[in-house]
Amino acid sequence: MGNIVYGNIISDEIKENIKNFIEMSVKNGNRQPHLVVIMVGDNQASKVYVSGKNKDCMQVGIKNTTLYYDDISEEDLISKIKELNEDKTVDGILIQLPLPSHINKDHIFNILNPQKDVDGFTPLNVGKLYLGQDTFVPCTPKGIIKILEYIGYYDLSGKKAVVIGRSNIVGKPIAQLLLNKNATVTICHSKTQNIIEQVRQADIVVSAMGNAKLIKKDWLKENSIVIDVGINRDENNKLCGDVDLEDVIDKVKYITPVPKGVGLLTRAMLLENTIIAYKNSINNN
Ligand code: GUN
């Protein structure tokens, strides 16, 4: 029987440490950390994520300002971000994706101050990640690495990892981070032929494809580690991952559930990245 790795066990401890750190910092006369979240339009999923971010910040003592725009031109959004880039009371700036189609997200991330880029989406920070330099790592991949380390996998020499999905937010950066840990990494995506054959060879599977319960036990190697990043609805409209957990649980060594898995780490990593930005800011001012 495999082990289900619940995210809250790891994320609660991280959040507790952050809360204690902020309390100490404020006691020592520093200001509170401050995260600004920008949301444009009324994407329902984004609203849920943004309110979760609000709640998390409040729990640990990070000041959170959320700027909601029903509509805004690209030019005006760029002016607003330039203003926040210079504002010394703002540590982190998060621009919730997706943006409406009249705003080119590349233009936005090209002007965002990389030192406040708590998502790790600016070209400079993406480049640093690929060079193996210290930088803001996108929250979901960073959270996945925390999970692997929590279950004892620090070095992945000799391990084969298969990542399903090639997005800039999850697939590409997690592949890079696994490579930095010496894994042999394959990225599969919608144009890959024989995905199952690839996955069957994997010691570590990271799935971020968005297909409800598609991965069954015949996809997996015995004793593999399965990290499920999918957020889907099953036939009963219940949240579920890309992996059919009940079907595979006897075959795997570890698996993260959906919900209560990777998502909680993603949220905790945003707080951790905000604290990194905060520390840099209070040490430089
Ligand atoms: N939309 C979905 N996931 C994310 C994320 O990690 N960051 C941002 N900014 N937007 C998202």
Image: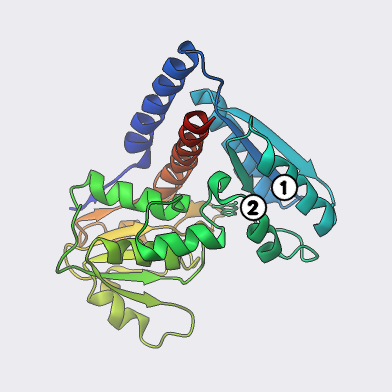
Secondary structure category for the residue under label 2: loop
Residue 243: tell me if it is visible. Answer: no
Instruction: Say few, some or many: other residues with alpha carbon within 10 Å of mark 1 (under 14 / 14 to 19 / 20 or more).
Output: some
Name above or below for residue 54 compared with residue 30.
below
Residue pointed to by mark 1:
81
Relative to residue 94, is residue 227 drawn left or right?
A: left
Q: Quadrant of the C terminus?
A: top right
Which of 202/251 is in front?
202
Secondary structure category for the residue under label 1: helix
Per the rendering, the mark at residue 228 is: none
Q: Position of residue 131 (x, y in %)?
A: 37, 65
Which of 127/255 is in front?
127
Q: Position of residue 67 (x, y in %)?
A: 74, 39
Q: Position of residue 111 (x, y in %)?
A: 67, 56
Name above or below for residue 206 compared with residue 87.
below
Instruction: Say few, some or many: other residues with alpha carbon within 10 Å of mark 2 (under 14 / 14 to 19 / 20 or more).
Output: many
* Residue type beneath disc 2: Leu
What's the CA distance linking mark 2 and mark 1? 7 Å
Which residue is located at x 76 percent, y 53 percent?
Answer: 78
Relative to residue 1, is residue 40 drawn left or right?
A: right
* Residue type beneath disc 1: Ile
Residue pointed to by mark 2:
112
